[in-house]
Each structure stands twice: as structure tokens, then as C-alpha cells.
Amino acid sequence: MLVKALFLDRDGTIIHDSSESIVALDQVRLIDRADDALALAKRAGFKLIMISNQGGIAKGVVTKERVDEINALLQSILATKNASLDLLYYAPYHPKYPKPEYDAFKSWRKPETGMIRQAQRDLAAQGLEIDFANSFFIGDKQIDVECGLRAGLRSILVKTGYGEEEICKEKHTLPELVANDLCDAIDYVLKINRANVVRHA
């Protein structure tokens, strides 16, 4: 079965970012309207997949267990709006802080596409095939845009978080859209989705 997916960065896209790694549960604050937007996308049939670099684990500033707790809290918050994520992935690897136990995740660190490929395999195990041509990667950094483009997804940059529009231009990794926030990005996605549904009706 063919499914559309939204691949989503976490920090600066779904929740407010921090100048350092997010290490405490009380730092988990949703960006305005993010939960409502994700609920709309889920209702429209999109799989919601989080793809996050968490190099703070390799740096030693946050534990894997704490990252799991933070993600669980995020899931519980989103669940109140029927907006919970379908799959969650994060890369503990960081090139400047090599740790043998995390070397296997080198291909997971964005802009590498390892997490997307893992999601593709995990969905395939459920009998689902990602419709890459109509799926999107939404994030606030240039590496998110590049990761999406490398994987054959349509990329959207949001201005919340880092909003690296100039870096995208410098590196010639241009997103399809620069949106104010996740809500605006998903509004764009759903308009395209509705137009496609009408066209194929």
C-alpha cells in the first residue's frame, strides 16, 4: 500500500529549540499550532515520522535515556490532539565526539539519509511503501533540506528555530518552500494533497 509521509525535524520545528541540547523535560515546549497542524496531516492520511540529530548523546551532555523520556513526553502531548508521531528516530552520533557505540549511526546523522531509509524499511515491514514524490521533509536547518533532497523528498524550510535560508542558498540546497512555521508548512502540503486528490478523482 502506497502512503505519503511527513518527515519532521524535532528541535526548532515541532518544539522550541535551545542554544544547547534539550536535556530537561521542562524544556519541551511545542511551537505554536504544531500539534493542530500535525493532527490535520494525520487525518489526511500522512505518516508522521520524526528524524532528529541528537549529537548531545555522543557529547555526553544528555543521555539516551533522557532523549527517550523527552520523546515520550512529546508523544503524550501530541496524543491529546490525536497528533502523535508514527515513527521516531534520532542519531546519537557526532563526528567531533567519536564513540565506538555510536559509530553504527554515522549514516543516520543528517544530512545523511540513514534514518529515512530505516523508516522506509520499517514501513515496508508493515506492507507500506512511501510515496516519495508526494512526501515531504520539514525542518529548520539546511541539513534538513539537504537530507530531504538526497532522499528524493520534497523539502520545506521553516523559519522557527535556526531557519537557515541563507545557508540553503549558499549550499545550493533550495527548499520547495520557506514557511513561517510548521503550521504554514503543513497547510501548504495539505493544499497540494487536496489538489492531487481532485486531479485523480
Image: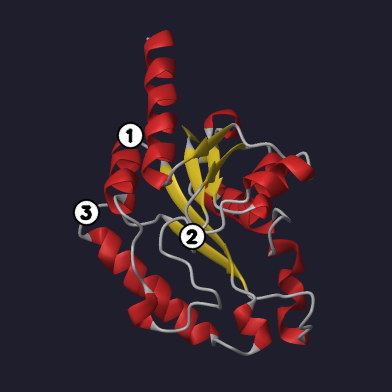
Residue 20, image quadrant: bottom right
Residues under numbered marks 2 and 1 in contact, where contact means CB atoms less than 8 Å apart: no
Which tag, 3 or 2, sits closer to the chain's start?
2
Placement of 84 over or under 53, stated as above or below: above
Q: Please, what is the three-letter code of the amino acid marked with disc 2? A: Gly
Return the residue at label 3: 81
Which tag, 2 or 1, sits closer to the chain's start?
2
Q: Is mark 1 on a helix, strand or loop?
A: loop
Q: Is mark 2 on a helix, strand or loop?
A: loop
Q: Please, what is the three-letter code of the amino acid marked with disc 1? A: Ala
Tell me the crowding category of disc 2: few under 14, some 14 to 19, or many 20 or more residues within 10 angstroms, Cα based. Answer: many
Tell me the crowding category of disc 1: few under 14, some 14 to 19, or many 20 or more residues within 10 angstroms, Cα based. Answer: few
3D distance between C-alphas at marks 3 and 2 = 20 Å
Return the residue at label 1: 44
Residue 46, image quadrant: top left
Which tag, 1 or 3, sits closer to the chain's start?
1
* Front residue of 129 and 141: 141
**Callout in the foreground (2, 1):** 2
Q: What element carries label 3?
A: loop
Q: Where is residue 151 in the image (x, y as percent from the top left)?
A: 69, 43
Return the residue at label 2: 12
**Callout in the foreground (1, 3):** 3
Disc count in the image? 3
Q: Position of residue 78 (x, y in %)?
A: 29, 59
3D distance between C-alphas at marks 2 and 1 = 24 Å
Visible in this render: residue 26?
yes
Residue 93, image quadrant: bottom right
